[in-house]
Amino acid sequence: MATHFYTASSLDGFIATSDHSLEWLFQQDFDMEGPMAYPAFAEGIGALVMGSSTYEWLLRSGGPWAYAQPTWVFTHRQLSVPEGADVRFVRDDVGNAFPEIDASANGRDVWVVGGGDLAGQFADAGHLDEVWVQYAPVTLGSGQPLFPREQQLELVDVARNRDFVCARYRVG
Ligand SMILES: NC(=O)c1ccc[n+]([C@@H]2O[C@H](COP(=O)([O-])OP(=O)(O)OC[C@H]3O[C@@H](n4cnc5c(N)ncnc54)[C@H](OP(=O)(O)O)[C@@H]3O)[C@@H](O)[C@H]2O)c1
């Protein structure tokens, strides 16, 4: 069982614009059957984790809730829950929250969806094993940071998927 931060990023290390837009990302071409694509990655995932900005982006994007797995949302606020979704709110240090999150994954892996600082909190607590980044061929100049920490990583895999350079790192 492992915990992965799996995300797309601009070349200059932002996962969303300052106003939380992902328009720049969805213009890019990505093969869902190709290397390091989401469907194969998601097969091993037993629980999702995200911060409230990421959760609110998913709520705004509409449509039915896409995840059958428990989804842990870190927030200090009260937020709505889509019908039928297994959403669990948490406001705590990652170290305190992790045992319950891990247990909810039922022997499978945990996916930290975002944002970057929350992934960093997992790393700080010693609970982040891998970082997977799909780099889009675009720079944003500013925005929500990929991983606002100094962190040594080991490159374990790299591939091209159409417009993206996909890299998989082990957390040192
Ligand atoms: N490029 C991609 O593939 C990709 C992937 C994922 C996300 N995104 C986007 O990236 C952006 C990320 O936004 P973000 O940087 O603001 O990060 P975020 O992690 O989504 O949200 C940060 C918020 O989560 C809450 N939080 C974080 N740690 C907490 C803790 N330990 N306890 C309680 N609450 C905690 C706080 O909000 P409260 O005020 O609610 O307490 C904090 O302001 C979003 O726009 C998202 O849509 C992009």
Image (tube, helix red, strand yellow):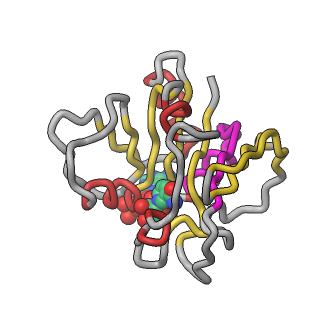
Image quadrant where residue 72 sits:
top left
Quick check: 45 above or below 131?
above
Image quadrant where residue 59 sits:
bottom left
Q: What stretch is highlighted in magenta?
A: 118-135
Judging depth in this view, the residue of 70 and 44 nearest the camera is: 44
Quick one: which residue is furthest to the bottom in this view? Answer: 141
Quick one: which residue is furthest to the top in this view? Answer: 107
- For the point 37% across and 29% down, the residue is 69
- Quadrant where the N terminus sits is top right
Judging depth in this view, the residue of 66 and 70 nearest the camera is: 66
Could you tell me how many numbered marks the image carries?
0
- Quadrant where the C terminus sits is top right
Image quadrant where residue 117 sits:
bottom right
On the image, the x and y values in percent for residue 114 come to: 51, 53
Residue 128 in magenta? yes
On the image, the x and y values in percent for residue 103 come to: 48, 21
Quick check: 126 above or below 150?
above
- For the point 81% across and 39% down, the residue is 156
- For the point 41% across and 72% down, the residue is 21
Residue 126 in magenta? yes
On the image, the x and y values in percent for residue 78 come to: 24, 54
On the image, the x and y values in percent for residue 17 come to: 48, 75
- For the point 76% across and 44% down, the residue is 169
Quick check: 110 above or below 119?
above
